[in-house]
Amino acid sequence: MSDPKLAALPEDIRGLSFEEAMGQLEAIVRDLEGGRGKLDDAIHSYERGTALRRLCELKLSEAQAKIDRIVAGADGSIATAPLDQNG
């Protein structure tokens, strides 16, 4: 595994897509906000949620890097440029 940040995540989380990870994270947040359940379960959910958040951040960074590398120029050429996050 080339990315040490990804390798540090639990194996069952590493293989998730962004959408799967975000869905699980949203479910954990709903459960924690509900305040139901045991403290140990809440701690485990919080730890898993933290790992899911890290995976989502890594996936978004990968997508950002791809966008930064491939930008079509007005003349049809391919150029490298950062993504304009303001618009």
Image (spheres, rainbow, N blue to C red):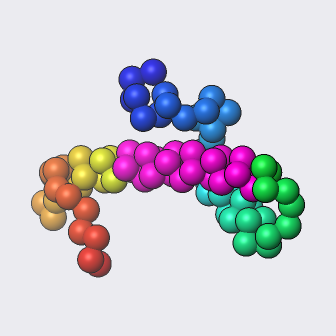
Q: Residue at x 49, y 31 (%)?
A: 8
The quarter of the image holding the N terminus is: top left
Specify whether 23 is left or right of 34: left
Q: Residue at x 30, y 47 (%)?
A: 65
Looking at the picture, tell me which residue is in the foreground, 72 or 25: 25
Looking at the picture, tell me which residue is in the foreground, 28 or 36: 36
Q: Residue furthest right?
A: 37
Looking at the picture, tell me which residue is in the foreground, 65 or 28: 28
| Residue 72 in sight in this render | no
Specify whether 64 is left or right of 71: right
**Residue 50 horizontal/vertical position (percent):** 57, 51
The quarter of the image holding the C terminus is: bottom left
Residue span colored magenta: 42-63
Magenta segment main secondary structure: helix
Q: Residue at x 63, y 29 (%)?
A: 11
| Residue 39 in sight in this render | yes
Specify whether 64 is left or right of 58: left
**Residue 7 horizontal/vertical position (percent):** 49, 28
As for residue 55 lying within the magenta part, the answer is yes
**Residue 30 horizontal/vertical position (percent):** 74, 69
